[in-house]
């Protein structure tokens, strides 16, 4: 069955590609190790598998040796690749594809999770254990209180007691343990909020206001979240290796800014090529493209969580086609064309390579090359 699917893809891809128009393409790429080293490239919009092949190495030359014949079948120009920071893959994108590399958001967040969230969770568990032990000690003292005539066991001044010897002392120990646990829990929540904030801020469009954002502002916001995480790590005395991981994630921030600027520049050039009036150009940049971007984000969320994004998208888009709107005087064919272009341009910003992460044999069957071939070649 699998051999038949592969054979079908080998025959159908060149047949369908023969009459396709030239298409600018963003790809997602990864190296997986299920059943051996495998190099993978996919189109994130259609999940079309451009390359999925076992390899002996993952350097830039090997990537090119496998990708060149795969791309030669398609009338595509790769303008952007989204992946992790694997050196061979980065070198291939720069030297052979001569395309922009977009960093994967997940790998930035994951590096910070490994740096801080794990060690902080360990500290919080230890603090919770201290609360449990202090509670049990207080319960024991309360259930068997000493008589009025009893005196605490004498001890040498240099040896502190291992356990509280009075109810008052036990209560103080428990209170201190609870405060420490609550403090650590609050710190962990702050780390989680900063991690979520990085994901929330790294968008081409502001998700609350529906306006385009610039790379400098986005990078500044992300940097502020990382600084907050670093401050917590330093305050908690986390290891040097933890701080090094934070610095590793931080080094990707300029690439995130560059990606926003690359997308903005590409979108600007594409809209300019439409040769439209200034009001229509403004409507495309400020309203139509952001509205379809919000729709894309809404598709990644639950129905209830995506509802506000879809509502905002509709508020941006509907007035453009209403009487007196910037696109209302255009023909239905022109309106449909601009909508199609806006959807395409809204998809240029690609911050995740999740569709190629961890692929294996069962996913290969699910995302059959032949099935998606027709989608990418449209």
Image (cartoon, rainbow, N blue to C red):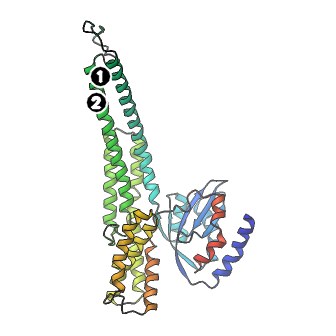
Point out the image quarter for the C terminus.
bottom right
Q: Nearer the viewer, residue 294 or 194?
A: 294
Horizontal and vertical percent position of residue 126: 40, 33
Mark nearest the camera among 2 and 1 is 1
Q: Are marks 2 and 1 in contact (CB under 8 Å)?
A: no
Q: Residue at x 38, y 66 (%)?
A: 203
Write down the quadrant of residue 315 in the picture: bottom left
The 10 Å Cα crowd at callout 2, few under 14, some 14 to 19, many 20 or more, is some
Along the viewing direction, whichever of 272 and 86 lies nearer the viewer: 272
Q: Is residue 36 left or right of residue 255?
A: right
Residue placed furthest toward the top = 149
Residue corresponding to mark 2: 176
Q: Would residue 262 be visible to someone looking at this image?
A: no
> What residue is shown at x 31% (from left), y 60% (from top)?
221
Question: Which of these two is toward me, 140 or 266?
Answer: 140
- Residue assigned mark 1: 170
């Amino acid at each position: 069955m699998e051999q038949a699917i592969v054979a079908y893809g080998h025959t159908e891809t060149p047949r369908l590609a023969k009459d396709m128009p030239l298409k600018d393409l963003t790809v997602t790429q990864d190296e997986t190790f299920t059943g051996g080293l495998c190099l993978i490239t996919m189109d994130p919009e259609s999940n079309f598998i451009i390359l999925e092949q076992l390899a002996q190495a993952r350097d830039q030359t090997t990537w090119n040796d496998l990708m060149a014949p795969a791309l030669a079948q398609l009338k595509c120009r790769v303008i952007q690749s989204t992946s992790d920071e694997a050196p061979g893959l980065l070198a291939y994108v720069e030297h052979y594809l001569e395309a922009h590399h977009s960093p994967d958001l997940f790998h930035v967040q994951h590096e910070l999770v490994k740096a801080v969230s794990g060690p902080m969770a360990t500290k919080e568990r230890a603090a919770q254990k201290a609360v449990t032990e202090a509670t049990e000690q207080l319960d024991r003292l309360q259930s068997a209180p000493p008589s009025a005539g009893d005196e605490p066991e004498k001890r040498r001044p240099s040896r502190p007691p291992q356990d509280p010897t009075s109810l008052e002392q036990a209560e103080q120990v428990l209170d201190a343990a609870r405060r420490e646990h609550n403090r650590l829990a609050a710190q962990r929540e702050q780390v989680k909020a900063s991690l979520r904030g990085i994901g929330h801020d790294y968008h081409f469009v502001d998700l609350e206001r529906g306006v385009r954002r610039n790379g400098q502002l986005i990078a500044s916001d992300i940097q502020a979240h990382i600084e907050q995480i670093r401050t917590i790590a330093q305050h908690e005395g986390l290891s040097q290796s933890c701080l090094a991981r934070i610095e590793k994630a931080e080094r990707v921030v300029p690439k995130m800014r560059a990606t926003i600027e690359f997308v903005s520049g590409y979108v600007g050039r594409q809209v300019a090529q439409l040769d439209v009036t200034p009001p229509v150009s403004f409507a495309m940049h400020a309203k139509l493209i952001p509205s379809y971007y919000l729709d894309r984000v809404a598709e990644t969320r639950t129905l209830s969580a995506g509802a506000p994004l879809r509502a905002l998208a509709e508020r941006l888009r509907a007035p453009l086609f209403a009487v007196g709107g910037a696109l209302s005087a255009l023909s239905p064919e022109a309106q449909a064309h601009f909508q199609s272009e806006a959807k395409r341009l809204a998809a240029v910003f690609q911050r995740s390579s999740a569709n190629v992460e961890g692929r294996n044999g069962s996913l290969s069957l699910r995302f059959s090359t032949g099935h998606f071939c027709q989608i990418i070649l449209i």
